[in-house]
Image (spheres, helix red, strand yellow):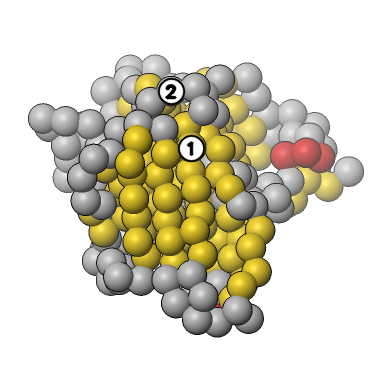
């Protein structure tokens, strides 16, 4: 079963507007972490934001915020005031934290290609 | 911030040859590193977990003899694609965790096998 689902293969947004990239996940572990990465055409993976399953508040990092709805198992990324440089592939990923040790294995979604139009 | 350096960025080789890709944690020690593979327009798939001083843990379907992983020090893991063939052409990217809830990726290595 797919653990991370990104239903939007591509998204378009006008410069300076906000955009939401969807991500739903599936896990039976009570403890897990959710990540969003940006991958520009150069290929590097750029960390954007992290949300832990026990975090009470939604994570925010500058123009990025994570709309974490635990009951719905969704972790949507919101980018405010889009910039042309935001055009890239965006991946949602999950880390299932096993008890007794650290585990940084990430399972990635298929990604959403965001295009910011001038 | 923590940096993971990956080398080479690009490599082109002939079919049948072996290619080594290095992944270094520059300013932190990494007892564990992760190797991913990404085909064009697809997501990242975990290939193996590299463990310092011990054998790597491979994901299901990944050939151990094809993709040799060595993690001889706390700052270096290497992935060797042995007897490479055109179907091994892909983007290989490593990662390591410099701290809790942070996973840093290298810039990736694009392998083309002719």
* Residue labelled with disc 2: B28
Please identify the quadrant where the C terminus of chain A is shown. Answer: top right
Kindly identify the residue that appears in the image at 33 percent across and 41 percent down: B72
Q: Residue at x 56, y 61 (%)?
A: B91
Question: B44 or A113: nearer the eye?
Answer: B44
Residue appearing at x 48%, y 37% in the figure: B24
Q: Residues within 10 Å of mark 1 (few under 14, many from 20)?
A: many
Q: Chain of mark 2?
A: B
Position of B74 with respect to A30 (left or right) is: right
Label tally: 2
In the image, residue B35 sits, relative to residue A54, either above or below, namely below
Say which quarter of the image contains residue A34.
top left
Q: Measured along the vertical axis of the image, is residue B82 above or below residue A53?
A: below
Location of mark 1 (residue): B24
What secondary structure is found at the residue carrying circle 1?
A: strand
Q: Position of residue B112 (x, y in %)?
A: 62, 71
Instruction: Please determine whether, in this image, residue A64 is positioned above or below residue B23.
Output: above
């Amino acid at each position: 079963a797919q653990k991370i689902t990104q239903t939007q293969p591509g998204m378009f947004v006008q410069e300076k507007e906000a955009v939401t990239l969807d991500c739903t996940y599936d896990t039976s572990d009570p403890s897990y972490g959710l990540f969003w990465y940006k991958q520009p055409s150069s290929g590097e993976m750029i960390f954007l934001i992290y949300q832990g399953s026990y975090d009470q508040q939604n994570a925010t990092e500058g123009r990025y915020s994570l709309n974490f709805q635990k009951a719905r198992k969704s972790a949507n990324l919101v980018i405010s005031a889009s910039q042309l440089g935001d055009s890239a592939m965006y991946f949602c990923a999950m880390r299932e934290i096993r008890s007794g040790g650290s585990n940084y294995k990430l399972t990635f979604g298929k990604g959403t290609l965001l295009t910011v139009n001038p | 911030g923590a940096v993971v350096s990956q080398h080479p960025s690009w490599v082109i080789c002939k079919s049948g040859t072996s290619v080594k890709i290095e992944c270094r944690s520059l300013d932190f020690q990494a007892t564990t590193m992760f190797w991913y593979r990404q085909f064009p327009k697809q997501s990242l798939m975990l290939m193996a977990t590299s463990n310092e001083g011990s054998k790597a843990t491979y994901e299901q379907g990944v050939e151990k003899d094809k993709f040799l992983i060595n993690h001889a020090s706390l700052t270096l893991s290497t992935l060797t694609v042995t007897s490479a063939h055109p179907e091994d052409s892909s983007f290989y990217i490593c990662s390591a965790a410099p701290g809790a809830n942070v996973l840093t990726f290298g810039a990736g290595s694009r392998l083309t096998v002719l």
